[in-house]
Amino acid sequence: MTVAATPPDETYQESTDYSWTEKAFDMLKCDDLQAEVVSLDGVVRSQVQGPCPRCRHPIDDRQTHTAVTGLMGGQSRGPGRAGPDQRGDSETGLVFFPVDVSCGCGDSHPGAPAGTTGCGVSFRVELPLQPADGSHQ
Amino acid sequence: MTADPVPRARKPATAPSKTDLDERDRYAKLTAGSMDTVRGSAQTWRTGLAAFITLVTTGVVIQGRDTTDGLAEHWRVLITVLIGGGLLLAVLGLWQALAAEVGTDPRKQTLQDIRAVHGTLTAYEVYLAAQAARRLQWGRRAVVGAVTLLLAGIAATWWARAPAASPPAYLTVTHGHAVTCGTPQEAGSGQLRLSVPGSLSTVTIPISQITALALTAACP
């Protein structure tokens, strides 16, 4: 008889400790976590999928990083070009885009405030910004 | 073994701060409100433009030909082109604002279609908002052009010259005890024929009866 390997529920703990960012990076390297940042017609979106670095519950974080803001002197605001947070890689010429992800596993962890899902951990991943044609999952 | 041409990720220098996460959440609201932002702006522009076009068109209709009636032909052509072009651009601007507000290309799309191209519904909405914003920007440019042309048209009416006044073309003829004033017309030999203003008929006077002739700018 086999038992489904359901990770035990971690207690809720809000944390942005750098160790989670490091762990997420390691998980990206070994393909445990999949992520992409894609730009289509100037609209940048990201998707981070896989287990949460802390509670190991599955997360599917989708964000849109472009907004149409005040309409005077321009249309949309987004990471169309490298800014202070999107340092280009001098070797590859790639623009890396930071994405902040909070565990949104959908489960209510013990000790979580009412109506809050996820284990409370947040981390950052930096991903190469790719045009839609070259997107891969 | 071949190296991965695109690195999957780079190790971030810092973790996100609480402020970063708050800003991310606030930005998500801004993103979700993109379409409303554009539509709101487009609605304002559409209302303003419609009022503007109504005002200008009414002005042109009420004025009618009065403004240009007494002008030389080349000035009339110039003013017509400027005001007509201005109105045309204003209508184009109004069309663009309307298109930005309500769209012009309705089509059926499944969520799968949208996901396949844009990834997420929000990204699709932002894409549509950006398209609408682009149309609105063209609309605003058209309005700038319209106002410029209309102002130039108005200014042209101030500076336009009236055609040169015609030389006196009336002839006052004294014949016997009568005096007739009118425009000379073609007549047989020994006769003078005058077309009298305000009368449909002409007056023919034998030249032998004429005792005096005078050129005059207007008939009494």
Image: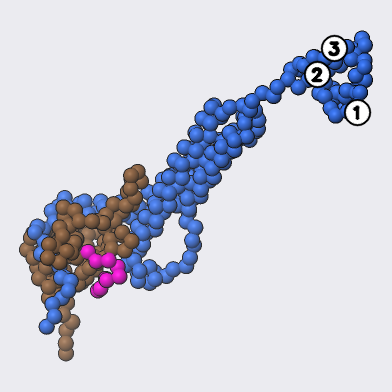
The furthest residue to the top: B177
* Dot 2 and dot 3 within a common chain: yes
Residue at 16%, 50% in the rendered image: B19
Task: Write the start and end of the magenta stretch as one range.
Answer: A129-137
Looking at the image, is mark 1 or mark 3 earlier in the sequence? Answer: 1
Badge 3 crowding class, 10 Å Cα cut-off, few under 14, some 14 to 19, many 20 or more, is few
Q: Which chain is blue?
A: B
Q: Chain of mark 3?
A: B
User: Looking at numbered disc 3 in the image, what kind of residue is underneath it?
Assistant: Ala
Quarter of the N terminus of chain A within the rendering = bottom left
| Camera sees residue A95 | yes
Which residue is found at the position 30% from the left and 70% from the top?
A133
Q: Using the rendered view, name the quadrant where residue A101 is placed.
A: bottom left
Depth check, front residue: A136 or A90: A90
- The brown chain is A
Q: CA distance from mark 2 to mark 3?
A: 10 Å
Q: Could you tell me if the residues under marks 2 and 3 are in contact, i.e. CB atoms within 8 Å?
A: no
Judging by the rendered image, the residue that carries numbered circle 2 is B171
Residue B162 position in % (x across, y down): 61, 26
- Quadrant in the rendering for residue A85: bottom left
In the rendering, at what x and y percent does residue A88 appear?
Answer: 15, 60
Residue B212: mark in rendering: 3
**Magenta span includes A132:** yes
Q: Is residue B178 rendered magenta in the image?
A: no
Q: Residue at x 85, y 15 (%)?
A: B173
Q: Which mark is residue B188?
A: 1
**Is residue B185 found left or right of B115 in the rendered image?**
right
